[in-house]
Amino acid sequence: MWFLALFFTLLVSFVNQFFYLRQNPVSITYTVVSHISLPIGKFLARVLPTTKFRIFGSLGGPLVSLNPGPFNIKEHALIGTAVACCSGTAYAVDIVILQKKYYGEDQGFMAGFMLVLTTQVTGFSLAGVLRKFLVRPPSMIWPANLVTVALFRTLHESSEDGDEDDIIDTDHIQGEGEQGHEMKQGSRASSRFSGIRKKRKVSRLRFFTYVSLGSFIWYWFPNYIFPTLTAFSILCWINPQNVILSQLTGSNGLGIGTLSFDWATSTSALSPLVTPWWAQVNILVGFVIVAWIIAPIVYYSNLWNSKNFPILTAGLFREDGTPYDKAMVMTNNVLHPVKYEAYGPLRMDSFFALTYGIGFAGLTATLTHVALYHGKDIRDQWRAAIAMKDHDIHSRMMMKYKEVPQW
């Protein structure tokens, strides 16, 4: 496990960061590694020797083995977790690159390395400090992790139809009190649905294989064979010369009524298989109000001289719509007020301005909403976590392992 985790961590972090700045970046996700590491792990479990030895030889140390046993789901999950922690690119790298590329400032390797390291470690540190409140409580369910759990269970399914993995035998449950009661409750719930499972024609592993194969075949159509499927605008096809229609419905405009048959495009913001339904509806309604109602009204009413700029762009402009040359208002990479006054103010398109304003307003609205609607739940959860109450069976099982020091 340690060898595979270290190998894939180094490989994935290097490949993802190296290709991050390419026009067509290549990215290796933890899902890909989870598939690849399974046959490799099983192969190593068969061929590696089981001989035990001491790390420091005659000096002592714990006994270790290159092959501790069969490759199990716990080792597989730890490899996936290690890769997931490093598969994303470090945002702090953008600061180092932009300073060197556009401002001619080279802070040196050590300064850039420390910036990236400290910003990355900060997130892990906060997660570790707050694990008592964000991980252990049974109410802290992270929907994205449920997909990962289902993936590992499917790949390690021991039976053909998966029933043995789903049903707990209450006659062999060890333990008394609340723990035994909870496990028996879970087994009764499983038995109620056991009849449904036995009618299942396709096992989870086989269904997973079918879906993976179908996804692999379909991927070639929107990305290489017929790229129009990525963003299919029927209204634009009716009258492609109409500028207003192109702005409202085109893939480079607001995309009203545009359909996408590319799964990667559809899930670029969030996955509908993971995100709760109420959250999806909330996002959809907000998007329609801002992008398809407010943005066109602001643009075609020429508010802020919006028609001088494209309806949707991340570029910066002068008041007459020409691109803004930042070199004209800066001296030694610092804004010069006199030059800025002479060159003119900076302008952005109306949609960009709206999203910026709503983004800042959303930060305050989030705090207010959470305080009003979930304040009592957070307070109760905080007290229960401090008092070490309301731990479910999984948390109590994890308490058998030694905790990482809080410092």
Image (cartoon, grey):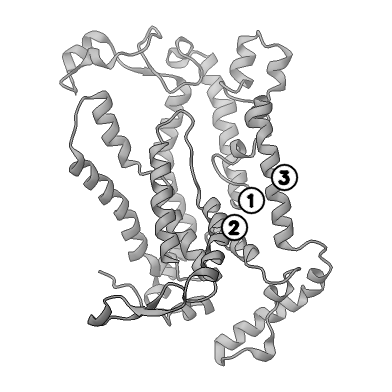
Vertical placement of residue 80 versus 341, above or below: below
User: Element type at marker 1?
Assistant: loop
Task: Kindly indicate whether the residue at mark 1 contacts the one at mark 2 (C-beta within 8 angstroms).
Answer: yes
Location of residue 378 (image quadrant): bottom left
Location of residue 169 (image quadrant): bottom right
Query: Quadrant location of the N terminus?
Result: bottom left
Image-based side of 274 in relation to 203, left or right? left
Which numbered tag is attached to residue 147? 2
Disc 3 crowd rating (10 Å Cα; few below 14, some 14-19, many 20+) is few
Of label 3 and label 1, which has the lower sequence position? 3
Image-based side of 205 in relation to 55, left or right? right
Which numbered tag is attached to residue 195? none
Disc 2 crowd rating (10 Å Cα; few below 14, some 14-19, many 20+) is few
Query: Quadrant location of the C terminus?
Result: bottom left
Which numbered tag is attached to residue 273? 1
Of label 3 and label 2, which has the lower sequence position? 2
Query: Residue 198 location in percent, x, y?
Result: 81, 71
Query: Residue 213 location in percent, x, y?
Result: 70, 47
Label 3 – label 1 distance at C-alpha: 17 Å
Which residue appears at 68% of the width and 74% of the height? 165
Q: Amino acid at mark 1?
A: Leu
Location of residue 22 (image quadrant): top left
Could you say which is closer to the camera, residue 380 or residue 276?
276
Q: Amino acid at mark 3?
A: Gly
Vertical placement of residue 318 versus 372, above or below: above
User: Element type at marker 3?
Assistant: helix
From the viewer's perspective, is the residue at label 2 or at label 1 nearer?
Answer: 2
In the displayed image of the protein, which residue is found farthest to the bottom? Answer: 176
Of label 2 and label 1, which has the lower sequence position? 2
